[in-house]
Each structure stands twice: as structure tokens, then as C-alpha cells.
């Protein structure tokens, strides 16, 4: 009886996975200006193309998830004039993006999407710190990377390139102050 139950659960899980993968993600473009939709499609395609996916259906779903994220961020930016309310709404919806991508992508691919949405600032900035401070200890390197990845999480929800870079600027200030206190010049 236990074997039958375990087999049933395993089959059910496989069926649910197949069903989740088979669902088509629709592009939320209704009522949006054509030029704006095309701009977002072009921007998102560059990010998704870098993943070099072979399955056209998976690629289309991932592309629509990324586009829809940009649309959502814009909708929230337009709806909320109060910064606190805007940030609360963005936070409420933040984790759904990675969860949606996880239906189709590996963790490394999800990171690549986030890096694409934030212009690769994490790796470039991290590399610059390593070059500028070659004597950093492993724990210091981890702290810097963690802060830059935290900045990326906030930046992916920003509504403009300027706002995205502002998050990184804030965290670079934090890193620079921390390094200065640790004796790095």
C-alpha cells in the first residue's frame, strides 16, 4: 500500500510539472502603446537571447515573463506617486518574478536574466573591487558580492536605468565606507 501511494505521488508530481511547463505565458500587452511594447520586446529579447535556449516554446514563455515584469514595474510606477506605497507594492510582487522564471530556467539562468536587467553591474563592479583591492580576504570578497547582489535585487524592480544605477550607487557607498573602516584606501 505504501509503495502504491508513493508511486501515485511521484506520478502526480510529474504530471503537475509537465502541466506547469506546458502552460503558455501570455504577453500582457493589451492596451499598451505598440511602440512601447516593441521597445520592451527588443530589450527583453537581448536578455533572453543571451541564455541560448534551444526550446522555442520555453524561450517564448521566458521572454513573456521578462516583458511582463517590465510592464508590471511600469504599471506600478504609474499607479503609485507615494514612494512608500510603490516600494511596498514592488516588494509584494518581487519574488513572483524569480518563481515564474524558475518554471523554465536554472538558478544560473535566472541570475543571468537579473544581470541582463541590471546591465551586468554586479560582475563589473565586483571585478573592479578585486582589481582595486587585490589583498581582500575571502570573507571581505563575499561581503562585497553579497551587497552587490542585494543591490541587484532592488535594482531589478527599479523603473528606469537611472533608478537601477542609483541602487548600485547606494551600495557602492556602503561598500566603500565599510572598506575604509577596515583600513583600505
Image (spheres, grey):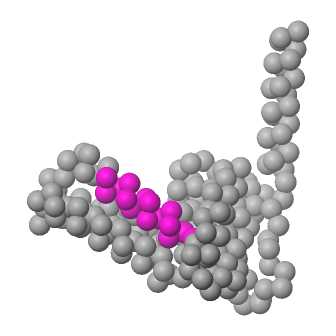
Q: How many marks?
A: 0
Find out whether residue 152 is within the magenta segment. yes
Would residue 67 be seen by someone viewing this image from the given angle? no
Q: Name the side, left or right, on which 87 lies relative to 130.
A: right
Picture coordinates of residue 97 (x, y %)? 65, 60
Q: Which residue occupies 81% across, 47% down? A: 20
Find out whether residue 164 is within the magenta segment. no
Looking at the image, the residue that sits furthest to the top is 1
Q: Which residue occupies 83% across, 85% down? A: 31
Q: Name the side, left or right, on which 150 lies relative to 53.
A: left
Q: Which residue occupies 44% across, 60% down? A: 150
Image quadrant for the C terminus? bottom left
Q: Name the side, left or right, on which 16 lies relative to 156.
A: right
Image quadrant for the N terminus? top right
- Asked where in the image residue 128 lies, by quadrant, the reply is bottom left
- Asked where in the image residue 156 lies, by quadrant, the reply is bottom right
Picture coordinates of residue 176 (x, y %)? 23, 67
Q: Name the side, left or right, on which 31 lies relative to 43.
A: right
Q: In the picture shown, does residue 142 fall above or below 28? A: above
- Asked where in the image residue 24 lies, by quadrant, the reply is bottom right
Picture coordinates of residue 76 (x, y %)? 67, 78
Would residue 68 be seen by someone viewing this image from the given angle? yes
Q: Which residue occupies 80% across, 62% down? A: 25
Picture coordinates of residue 99 (x, y %)? 67, 53
What are the residue bounds of the magenta stretch?
143-157
Q: Nearer the viewer, residue 44 or 56?
A: 44
Q: Nearer the viewer, residue 123 or 182?
A: 182
Q: Nearer the viewer, residue 86 or 50?
A: 86
Q: In the picture shown, does residue 73 fall above or below 105? A: below
Q: Main secondary structure of the magenta part?
A: helix
Amino acid at each position: 500500500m505504501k509503495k502504491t501511494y508513493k508511486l501515485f505521488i511521484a506520478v502526480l508530481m510529474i504530471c503537475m510539472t509537465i502541466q506547469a511547463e506546458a502552460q503558455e505565458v501570455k504577453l500582457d500587452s493589451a492596451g499598451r502603446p505598440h511602440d512601447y511594447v516593441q521597445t520592451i520586446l527588443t530589450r527583453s529579447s537581448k536578455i533572453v537571447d543571451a541564455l541560448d535556449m534551444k526550446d522555442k516554446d520555453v524561450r517564448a514563455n521566458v521572454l513573456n515573463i521578462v516583458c511582463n515584469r517590465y510592464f508590471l514595474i511600469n504599471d506600478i510606477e504609474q499607479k503609485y506617486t507615494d514612494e512608500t506605497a510603490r516600494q511596498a507594492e514592488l516588494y509584494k510582487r518581487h519574488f513572483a518574478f524569480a518563481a515564474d522564471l524558475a518554471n523554465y530556467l536554472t538558478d544560473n539562468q535566472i541570475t543571468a536574466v537579473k544581470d541582463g536587467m541590471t546591465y551586468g553591474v554586479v560582475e563589473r563592479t565586483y571585478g573592479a573591487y578585486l582589481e582595486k583591492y587585490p589583498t581582500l580576504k575571502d570573507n571581505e570578497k563575499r561581503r562585497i558580492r553579497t551587497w552587490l547582489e542585494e543591490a541587484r535585487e532592488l535594482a531589478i524592480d527599479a523603473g528606469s536605468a537611472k533608478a537601477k544605477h542609483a541602487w548600485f550607487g547606494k551600495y557602492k557607498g556602503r561598500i566603500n565606507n565599510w572598506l575604509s573602516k577596515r583600513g583600505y584606501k
